[in-house]
Amino acid sequence: MPSHFQLLKTDTATAARRGRLQTLHGVIETPIFMPVGTQGTVKAVTPVQLREVGAQIILGNTYHLNLRPGSELVRDMGGLHKFMGWDGPILTDSGGFQVFSLSKLRNIQDDGIAFQSHLDGAKLFLGPREVMTIQANLGSDIAMVIDECPPWPCTRDECRAAVDRSYRWAKLCKQIATDNGFLAGGHHVFAIAQGSTYDDLRREAAESLAELDFPGYAVGGVSVGEPEPEMLKQVAATTPFMPAGKPRYTMGLGTPSQILKMIGLGVDMFDCVHPTRVSRNGAAFTPDGMINLRNERYRADSSPLVEGLDNYTCRQFSRAYLRHLVMANEILASTLLTIHNLHFYLDLVAQARARIEAGDFAAWSKAWISRYEAGEASG
């Protein structure tokens, strides 16, 4: 039986990889960025628009979808793909990070996490069986195990306990997914390596999870408040010890330059709310950094957001018009900027794939990052 993941090429100057991941709902070319559809929608855009900007896979959120409308309802409506009108692959996170972010409302136990709903205060529980059942109800192409994400900073003892607990939960998640036929049905389950800022615990987590032979692996517990150099150090301390023949995913980040840096560290998959969130605040990405369209300098700017970038927003509208929409608080501003910003991210990883194939990823990414960060610094 052929592997679900093909490693097509590895860069000679960096750890960048070009791969292909097979899922029930289609093939994913990696490296790839995944737009975030927390509540069964990528905010401000339709599934058709997602396809037009090059989205191959999107995210759904286990925690939020189980609270509202409920995973059983989604299951009874034919699964998340049918429910939200998206026929491509979907990855769902386990909900563990949302519970982490609700630290005042949760209690971590050996068998799972007891917490209160942020909507109505109802008492709820998420453990390995619950998260695998919810994701099976949703029909996820890729389901994430539940893990404990330690805070930053944290003590070594706190991190040790989180790594050990996450390993036990991951093992249970895989066993449950095997017993209920989820894995046999062609769905994937990805493990999550924790370890905070402790390189030896990161390595231990990655190596111990690798022995469990999951279909894919994620770097967890990064971008939780630490500075960028520390975040990149944590990724670099983890990815070398993940299986080379399985996809690698860094969860919940980052900026365009961070994504290129992490591709160079051997990461294949990314997600982040950043491009959609800043769209709703009137900001847009360019090769020279992010720009704020509220600035007066764009009031009479007839140029597109990015000259030559082939998306609907750049083809049709000027910076002046987009600024007008932002200043007038028109809903269309969010849609047009989201189209552009998602396409900017997806075009960037498409360029990265091409450069890895061409063999010049290292020089290209260094130049791209230099230009982008210089623009950010001067902007």
Image: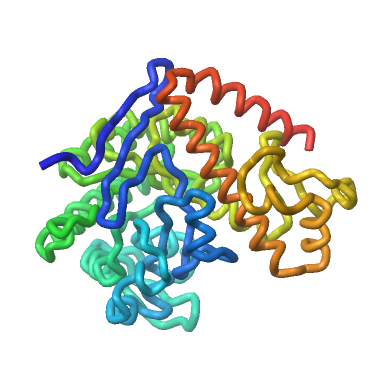
Instruction: Name which residue lies at 12% across and 57% down.
Output: 184
Q: Residue 21, position in %: x, y?
A: 29, 43
Left or right, 70 with reference to 190: right
Residue 66 picture quarter: bottom left
The residue furthest front is: 316
Q: Between 303 and 116, which is closer to the camera in this rendering?
A: 303
Left or right, 57 with reference to 294: left
Vertical side of 348 occupied by 142: above or below: below
How many numbered marks appear? 0
Instruction: Name which residue lies at 46% across and 69% down.
Output: 39
Vertical side of 65 occupied by 37: above or below: above
Q: Quadrant of the N terminus?
A: top left
Q: Residue 104, position in %: x, y?
A: 48, 68
Q: Quadrant of the C terminus?
A: top right
Left or right, 330 with reference to 213: right
Left or right, 202 with reference to 257: left
Instruction: Name which residue lies at 67% across and 38% down.
Output: 308
Q: Residue 34, position in %: x, y?
A: 45, 50
Instruction: Name which residue lies at 39% across and 21% down.
Output: 11
Q: How is the image coloured?
A: rainbow
> From where the camera sits, is residue 111 visible?
no
Residue 309 picture quarter: top right
> From where the camera sits, is residue 304 visible?
yes
Q: Residue 200, position in %: x, y?
A: 32, 31
Q: Between 367 and 304, which is closer to the camera in this rendering?
A: 304
